[in-house]
Image (cartoon, rainbow, N blue to C red):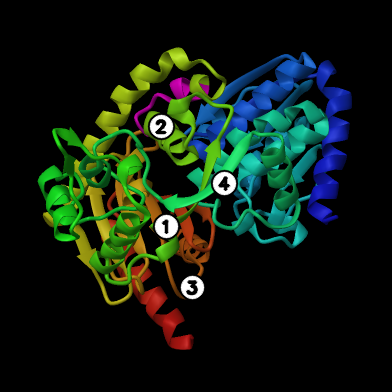
Amino acid sequence: MSLLIDEIERVAKIFKEIIKKKHIRIYAQFDSDGITSASILVTTLLREGCNFELRILKQLNSKTVNDITFSNSDFLIFLDMGSGQINILKGIIEKTNVLIIDHHEPIRYEHPNLFHLNPILFGENPEKYSTSLLVFMFSKFVNPKNIDQIDLAIVGAVGDRRDEGIKVGAMKEILEEAENLGFINVIKDLKFFGWDKPLFKVLAYSIDPFIPSIYGNEAAAMQFLQDLGIRVKEYERWRTLKDLTSEEKAKIADGIIKEKLGFIEPSEVFGEIFLLQRKPEFLRDSREFSLLINACSRLGKSELALRLCLGDYSVYNEILKILEEYRKQIAKSISLIENGRIVEKENGIFIIGGREIPDALIGTITSLLLNSKDPTKPIFGLAYDATTGMIKISARKKNGNINLREILVNVVKEIGGEAGGHKDAAGGYIPVGMEQEFIERINKMIGEMNAKG
Ligand SMILES: [Mn+2]
């Protein structure tokens, strides 16, 4: 057994003993990993008959921490955030019990009131975990019944793009168990979803895989398929993913890999897909489920996503409308970028979102562009965030040894702000007006790091 799993088990047992005497307050990060984590925990607490409150936070920072109210008998839980913000949580930890379940780079801090579950603290690779998987393991120790939450755990992992590597260690056993119990089915296929929708539409609106040359352009998607020798229509009916032969699927995969000229791994186009066997048809594909959650969150409707996770399917039609709006906003942001809101320096690419690209979308957009720009350069998305009155930063990279979290932490030390995250995906805030300074300093810093090797 691993030290991490031992610790999850130990904390789960203590938790089970004391939770009935406590009022529990859950704070979860607003993306698909955070919301699935919150849902798993909500189900767990309901099964234990506990009192709790839940809030979804866009970001935990020195401003939003002030909104956290509690009394000394409360038990606070932070999901998919908190590890990197321990400094601002110390005041709370001094006064009451805090449980952090997270996989972002942690600050090491010990206190009798603090339970801190983070793979990095136990020498494990954080790339193998999402918070949803950690919360799931925790919940399973609280009550073995919670094995049925495996599907949400997978949706969260998919949202963080952790699905490629999760079949290792403890997760491998859990996934096999879930497969045997009929909760999930793992297949290999093209990584698109929308099995019954016209194929050209599926390609035109896919954001993962993302094909920039046809995104949002149905005519271009049709042309792309025709150029590959794939019929888009059969008699009077549009063909769908379901209609494709394996040869045609291979042609599409090859076509995309060629189109993207090495900007994409073959496994991002064709690979393992987790199907959720116990969910209704429209939520069966874990990637589609995850996209719906993200669309809701990014457009400020995380409560709908939460309801969907908890099994209230009456919200589905409303969520489909949100998804449409989400896609429109992404298409609009991408066209803004193509029309000049981007700066390419020697050592990095910078998206200048200003007030035009919504701060809630800047992370998504930055990730998308990572698949179509020079893969040797990290990308930094900048957008104005009205809630903090600061410029939000999202940083992503594909290759190279530099650590984006470290770089952002160093820069905000010089120009002000906050930063946290992972080596390959980090984020933060800088003061308004410091954008140019930020770009210059980042470009210089990465240049110096690359020179050192
Ligand atoms: Mn996460």
Secondary element at tag 4? strand
Residue 186 disc label: 4
- With 310 as the anchor, is 181 left or right in this view? right
Main secondary structure found in the magenta portion: helix
Secondary element at tag 1? strand
Residue 292 disc label: 2
**How far is mark 2 from mark 3, CA to CA?**
32 Å
Q: Does the magenta stretch include residue 99?
A: no
Q: Which residue is drawn at 51% across and 19% down?
A: 307
Tags 4 and 2 touching, CB below 8 Å: no
Tags 1 and 3 touching, CB below 8 Å: no
What residue range appears in magenta?
298-306
Q: Look at discs 4 and 3 and give the one toward the viewer.
A: 4
**How far is mark 1 from mark 2, CA to CA?**
21 Å
Q: Label 3 amino acid?
A: Ile
Q: Label 4 amino acid?
A: Val
Report the residue marked by disc 1: 270
Q: Viewer-proximal residue, 376 or 380? A: 376
437 above or below 24? below
Q: Is residue 300 magenta?
A: yes
- With 303 as the anchor, is 153 left or right in this view? right
**How far is mark 4 from mark 1, CA to CA?**
13 Å
Q: Earlier in the sequence, mark 1 or mark 3?
A: 1
